[in-house]
């Protein structure tokens, strides 16, 4: 039947979406092939003539075609094919505001007027497309085009379009991140200096220059302690292991270090290096970026200069470093060609006339704020004098410094100062060797920035800037360890906003994104004083980690404070919005010993809080449907619906005026082949919490109407009542499903009565009321079930097209013994009669209650006094016996 096809269509499209999501070809290296696969599967899924993906160009203005699947095969396309915003202003305006753009008839659609010639040329009659959004902004589209006969795109197809657009958002983000990582990997590999990344003291990554320096392969370096490549002794004669903590301890505490260290290759050759160690936090763990520069050649040159004590200009001029030599008073007498190029002075300008102080900036290049000392703030000459004093003490002092050129510009160098001595050991001058390290610093800074950027993007929500789900689990794991060690508790709250979908659907995703940002800012400002941390998990879900809690009461007070904060009005683009939220709370160690376990329990509690409209709830085991039995039942329930393995029981309704059974209520039952009879209060909530509630409602409708047709053929004109979920009544296609079912069985609409509860209207009242009115226009009757136990009874009573109220059994049970229940029943009867409605009393179990209801002018009754719900055959036996024996004064059934 058509409504079954609609359900199957949704399932098939969902299967296509899941298959695409899991297809490894989308997440491989070939971006173009991944896009082509998406267009192919989407074209085939909707049997559309054409499917294409377009992205905004680099200017972010016009759309450029990325992939096209046409007539069953990939089509050649030109990447300079554009949809220009200037040529199609109305279309782009709709694209910016609408989640899905559906044009069933292109020729009659004003928004597509600028595409008429394009559509005529390709015989395109209908179009559907969905916007691909990143951080709330449209960055592309996926479009389906139909040729020939016009096509109406149904709700399942539109939902599929939205799902594929979300998949494309993930696809583009993934490949952009891969491109970024590849770019920074190339920078890392191309760096001239040897670069290695350490975790602890082990090498976890390195570039090609590192492998060349140690003359080895990558596999010989990975996960090997760096100390494995240290020489046994350092240049000053001390053992490397003896001074390890002195040299490397500051780096392990997060302070950058620069030093000279002697290493050893795998072939045993030792060499000295300049070592720069920079701390970096990756995924919550401390790493270090180590930059190694082989200074063997420079040291050899310096050693020869000291030994020969002669400064041959030819040697200096051939060096790649700036070499400046002075006498013991600091007067320059050697200035090599590299120094001239680097500093902009000629030798004639400075030899015999200047001192090195002219070339030095006032402060060192990389001063650290937490290490700033009085010495670093001294004038040039004082700082240089301190350096010379260290040299005279025999220190090998190499450090980053700033040189100033003749034109006043500055640049970073690695400066080494050596004292020149004669044969007697007296200082005769100083040798200053400096290398320009601008490019090295830039490469290090870019690498450091890229690592931090990747780390931040991996751990933070791009829209709100809040830490994301991954970061929550990292922090929660550490917090749980601390709580275990100290015997303390912590709380994890899960927060879901009320009516956020309504804001998105009504005002657009841009307003929804602004709303999420304001909520994030408000909650962060509130929670900081409680020592709590806020995370965005996705959509309108937030998590709150409270690492210091006193007791459950204090935790609930915080949850109540958060909920009260959400209820404060929010202004966005001149619109005042009022939201609420539902909060589920899980405690460590009461409800779980891991972040995943606590989050799942908080989710269960939040769902229960939303159901009960209670604002905030602690997790309780009885809330939890997420068990192996539930998962098994959920899978088997779908099969039971498809295989027609459920059954309906029928409970009669008796008219007090005529004494006749005028109808019955159809109640679904599940006789499980191995578990026996499963009660409705177990499997119906399962269906409610999944997509099975809609096919279950359709199964009940079809089965009940088929049975009503059989009875009518046999001369029994009974009204059959069925119960429907709010999910059924929010489906726009459901009225058509009812109409087709009645027509298929040849039944008049008045044979069907639909029972709804007052809570049915809560989630989306306007949409539900619209569907109810469409069904009522077919002639179908409506009854309010369990009247008085729901919400807004009087507010919706006058708006609903109902004929019957059913008084809940909880009021009928104590009608004769509880004055309040008696008053409620009388008031309900008076209210219903004033509205022209008939009343059914549920749960009538004794003769005295029956007589009192007759006295109060109740029209119909239903309960065990007459019969419990019965299978079809037993119900028919009961009906035959009741019709032949009962009289109006008695109304006592012969069967139970």
Image (spheres, rainbow, N blue to C red):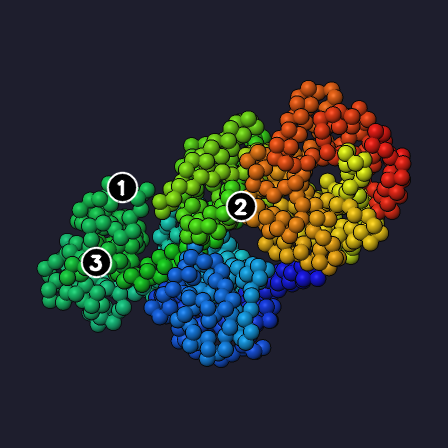
Q: Which residue is mark 1?
A: 373
Determine the residue positioned at 59% across, 37% down: 797
Task: For residue 475, say whether it is visible.
Answer: no
Whether label 3 touches label 1, CB < 8 Å: no
**Residue 214 position within the rendered picture, expressed as x and y whole percent measured from the top left:** 46, 65
Look at discs 2 and 1 and give the one toward the viewer.
Answer: 2
Quick check: 81 above or below 602?
below
C-alpha separation, residue under disc 3 versus residue under disc 2? 69 Å
Tag 1, which secondary structure? Answer: loop
On the picture, is 801 further left or further right than 345? right
**Residue 602 position within the rendered picture, expressed as x and y whole percent measured from the top left:** 59, 39
Q: Nearer the viewer, residue 639 or 261?
A: 639
Q: Nearer the viewer, residue 577 or 804?
A: 804
Q: Earlier in the sequence, mark 3 or mark 1?
A: 1
Q: Which residue is mark 2?
A: 766
Whether label 2 touches label 1, CB < 8 Å: no
Task: For residue 450, say whether it is visible.
Answer: yes
On the picture, is 467 further left or further right than 622? left
Q: Which residue is mark 3?
A: 410
């Amino acid at each position: 039947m058509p409504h079954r096809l609609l359900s199957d269509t949704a399932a098939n499209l969902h299967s296509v979406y899941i298959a695409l999501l899991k297809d490894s070809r989308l997440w491989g290296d070939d971006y173009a092939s991944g896009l082509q696969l998406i267009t192919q599967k989407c074209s085939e899924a909707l049997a559309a003539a054409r499917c294409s993906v377009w992205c905004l160009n680099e200017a972010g203005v016009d759309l450029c075609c990325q992939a096209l699947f046409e007539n069953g095969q990939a089509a050649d396309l030109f990447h300079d094919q554009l949809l220009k915003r200037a040529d199609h202003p109305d279309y782009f305006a709709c694209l910016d505001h609408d989640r899905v753009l559906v044009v069933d008839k292109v020729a009659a659609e004003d928004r597509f007027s600028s595409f008429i010639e394009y559509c005529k040329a390709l015989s395109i009659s209908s179009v559907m497309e969905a916007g691909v959004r990143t951080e709330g902004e449209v960055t592309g589209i996926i479009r389906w085009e139909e040729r020939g006969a016009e096509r109406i795109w149904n709700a399942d197809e539109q939902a599929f379009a939205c799902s594929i657009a979300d998949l494309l958002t993930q696809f583009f983000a993934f490949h952009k991140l891969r491109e970024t990582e590849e770019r920074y990997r190339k920078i890392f590999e191309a760096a001239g200096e040897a670069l290695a990344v350490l975790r602890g003291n082990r090498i976890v990554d390195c570039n090609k220059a590192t492998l060349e320096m140690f003359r080895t392969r990558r596999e010989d370096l990975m996960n090997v302690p760096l100390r494995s490549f240290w020489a046994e002794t350092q240049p000053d004669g001390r053992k490397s292991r003896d001074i390890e903590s002195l040299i490397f301890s500051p780096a392990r505490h997060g302070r950058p270090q620069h030093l000279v260290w002697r290493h050893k290759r795998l072939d045993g050759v030792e060499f000295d290096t300049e070592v720069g160690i920079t701390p970096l936090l990756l995924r919550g763990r401390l790493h270090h970026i180590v930059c190694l520069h082989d200074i063997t050649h420079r040291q050899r040159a310096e050693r020869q200069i000291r030994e020969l004590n002669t400064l041959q200009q030819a040697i200096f001029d051939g060096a790649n470093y700036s070499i400046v030599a002075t006498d013991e008073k600091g007067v320059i007498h050697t200035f090599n060609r590299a120094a001239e190029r680097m500093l902009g002075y000629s030798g004639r300008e400075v030899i015999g006339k200047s001192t090195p102080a002219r070339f030095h900036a006032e402060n060192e290049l990389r001063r650290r704020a937490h290490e700033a000392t009085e010495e670093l703030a001294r004038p040039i000459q004082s700082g240089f004098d301190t350096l010379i004093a260290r040299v005279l003490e025999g220190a090998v002092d190499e450090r980053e410094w700033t040189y100033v050129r003749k034109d006043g510009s500055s640049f970073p160098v690695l400066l080494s100062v050596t004292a020149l001595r004669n044969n007697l050991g007296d200082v005769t001058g100083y040798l200053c060797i400096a290398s320009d390290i601008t490019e090295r610093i830039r490469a290090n800074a870019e690498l450091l920035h890229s690592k931090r950027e990747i780390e931040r993007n991996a751990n933070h929500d791009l829209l709100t800037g809040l830490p994301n789900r991954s970061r929550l689990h990292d922090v929660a794991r550490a917090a749980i360890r601390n709580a275990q060690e100290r015997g303390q508790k912590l709380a994890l709250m899960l927060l879901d906003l009320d009516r956020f979908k309504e804001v998105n659907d009504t005002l657009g995703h841009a307003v929804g994104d602004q709303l999420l940002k304001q909520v994030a800012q408000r909650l962060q400002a509130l929670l900081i004083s409680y020592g709590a941390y806020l995370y965005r998990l996705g959509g309108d879900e937030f998590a709150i980690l409270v690492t210091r809690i006193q007791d459950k009461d204090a935790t609930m007070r915080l949850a109540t404070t958060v909920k009260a904060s959400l209820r404060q009005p929010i202004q966005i683009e001149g619109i005042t919005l009022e939201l609420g939220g539902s909060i589920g709370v899980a405690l460590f160690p009461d409800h779980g010993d891991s972040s995943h376990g606590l989050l799942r329990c908080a989710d269960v509690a939040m769902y229960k809080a939303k159901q009960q409209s209670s604002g905030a709830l602690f997790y309780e085991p009885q809330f939890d449907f997420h068990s192996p039995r539930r998962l098994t039942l959920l899978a088997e329930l779908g099969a039971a619906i498809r295989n027609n393995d459920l059954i309906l029981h029928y409970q009669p309704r008796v008219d007090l005026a005529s004494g006749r059974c005028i109808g019955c209520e159809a109640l679904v039952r599940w006789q499980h082949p191995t578990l026996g009879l499963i009660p409705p209060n177990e499997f119906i909530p399962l269906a409610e919490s999944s997509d099975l509630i809609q096919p279950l409602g359709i199964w009940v409708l079809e089965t009940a109407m088929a049975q009503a047709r059989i009875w009518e053929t046999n001369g029994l004109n009974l009204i059959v009542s069925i119960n429907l979920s709010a999910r059924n009544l929010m489906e726009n296609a459901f009225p058509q499903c009812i109409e087709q079912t009645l027509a298929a069985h040849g039944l008049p609409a008045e044979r069907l009565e639909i029972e709804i509860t007052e809570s049915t209207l809560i989630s989306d009242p306007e949409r539900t009321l619209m569907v109810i009115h469409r069904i009522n226009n077919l002639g179908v009757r409506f009854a309010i079930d369990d009247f008085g136990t729901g919400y807004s009874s009087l507010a919706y009573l006058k708006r609903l097209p109902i004929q019957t109220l059913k008084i809940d059994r909880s009021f009928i049970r104590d009608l004769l013994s509880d004055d309040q229940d008696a008053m409620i029943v009388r008031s309900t009867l008076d209210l219903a009669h004033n509205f022209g409605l008939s009343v059914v009393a549920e749960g009538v179990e004794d003769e005295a209650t029956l007589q009192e209801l007759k006295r109060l002018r109740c029209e119909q009754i239903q309960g065990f006094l007459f019969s419990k719900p019965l299978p079809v055959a037993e119900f028919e036996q009961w009906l035959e016996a009741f019709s032949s024996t009962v009289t109006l004064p008695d109304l006592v059934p012969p069967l139970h």
